[in-house]
Amino acid sequence: MIIKHKNILYMPNISPLGGIETYVYEMVKKYKDLDIAVVSKKCDKLQARRIKKYCPLYIHTDQKIECDVAIINYDVSIIDYINEGAKIYQTIHGDYSNPIYGGKKPPKHPRLTGYIAITKYLQKKIKELYETENVIMSYNPLTIEPSKPYLTFVTASRLHKNKGIERMKQFIRALDRAKIDYIWYCITNDTDVIKHPNIIFIQNRLDVDKWINLADYGILLSDSEADSYFIKEILYRNKPIITTPLPYLKEIGVEDGKNGYIIDFDCSNVDEVANKVEKIPKFIFKQLEDDYRNIFVKSKSKYKEELDMKYRVQAILNFYDMEDKEDKYKELPEKNKDGSPVRESQHIWIVDKERADYLLEHNAIKILEEIKPIEYTKDKEAKSVKIKAVKREPEVVEITSPFDNQKVFIADTITDKAEIKAVKPKKTNRKKAK
């Protein structure tokens, strides 16, 4: 199999939650009109589901990749599978000049066309680290789709040392000293790391926006961030952020007291901020523009049409689709009546693209035919629809069921004509049976 699309976005591991996972989702959501696909070696099930709303997702093993532009993240080994002549960019998501990285740098590769920095601050640092001018700057995309007896806070983050867990504890004590009435939702899998009646832990989930909408503030007290999606998700909804003095904040428009409050890294002003939080800043935040439209190749996505396709499929050997609404499962016999071995299942049915992809990945079916959807005009008149031609005339096929040896008649409605017309069914008057 060859993975072939004009634009490829590669992320080796897509976890249940994180800024990188938001980056992948926001990229495909914004650029779904392009011929773009996501390639990953491992992907969380819920993340995969939401990515597939906008573009194809491939789990990479050893497939070749043909594309015009590939944007890769972290793992450069994927380059060995990408065709010669493709432009390959590596996006840098971390501030590797920060001491917390211990001098670590993103991996290099001789075929890299260049790097993508996600802030101007980071662009400058990458040029210094690699001594190169081949660094494009593009902010990460974020599109926002258009409540309070308590003061409400929200944090969506891992609660580790470098994410500011100790600062959070100090801020909680300062809020209590200031007698602030609040609820603080922490969306994380690091539950119960803080014992406090006002802290509510919520397991990782993808609908973080619902909790942000409930909040008066977002809080993220990290040691380092390059361009935190959480901070932007807060600000893009015109909610103030309580955070640390991260070096890029001024660049994106964060001002202490105007659209948030800054807690010093050493927490020396934590009581001062706690006493200000009841005065919630009101503002309209100017959203940042990313530049991926000029990086991707101009193209037209056909993915929505593919999602509307139906497929007539046939089970391979003993597989029987449990989603076919059958009331029981029976395996195929080992031999036919004449003693010959059973080579194929007679079980033939129709599935949508998502189900067909899943069954193909598990080597459970073969596709007999593509069935294109019928298109309707605005006045609901059916338009003619071209379908894939087949080599046989309409017929009624008699099949002996391998499950109970009973004869089954299947009306075959597919013709060899290359064009058919959809016709509205005529209304009929049926009398109800007494």
Image (spheres, grey):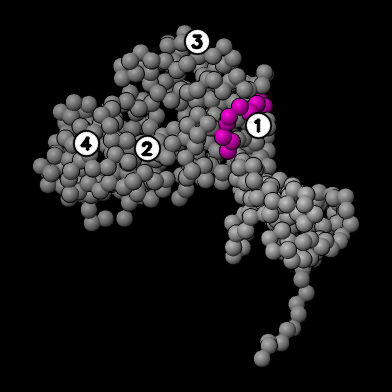
Q: Report helix, strand or loop for mark 4.
A: helix
Residue nearest the observer in this picture, 241 or 95: 95
Q: Residue furthest left?
A: 177
Please tell me whether residue 421 is drawn above or below residue 82 in the rendered image: below
Bounds of the magenta segment: 57-68
239 versus 263 height, above or below: below
Residue farthest to the bottom?
434
Disc 3 marks a residue whose amino acid type is: Thr
Query: Comparing marks 1 and 3, which lies closer to the viewer?
Result: 1
Q: Secondary structure at mark 2?
A: helix
Image position, residue 266 (x, y; %): 18, 26
Residue appearing at x 61%, y 42% in the figure:
362
Residue where numbered disc 2 is placed: 230
Residue lying at the far top of the rendered structure: 131
Task: Please name the residue that numbered disc 1 is placed on.
Answer: 3
**Residue carrying label 3:** 132
> Marks 1 and 3, Cα distance to the nearest angstrom?
31 Å
Q: Report whether residue 105 is seen.
A: yes
Q: CA distance from mark 4 to mark 1?
A: 45 Å
Residue position for label 4: 168
Neighbor class of circle 3 (other Cα within 10 Å; few <14, some 14-19, many 20+) is few
Q: Are marks 4 and 1 in contact (CB under 8 Å)?
A: no
Name the amino acid, label 4. Met
Q: Is residue 82 left or right of residue 380?
A: left
Q: Disc number at residue 37?
A: none
Marks 2/3 in contact by CB < 8 Å: the verdict is no
Cα distance in 3D space between marks 4 and 2 = 16 Å
Query: Quick one: 237 or 357, which is closer to the camera?
Result: 357
Mark 1 or 2, which is nearer the eye?
1
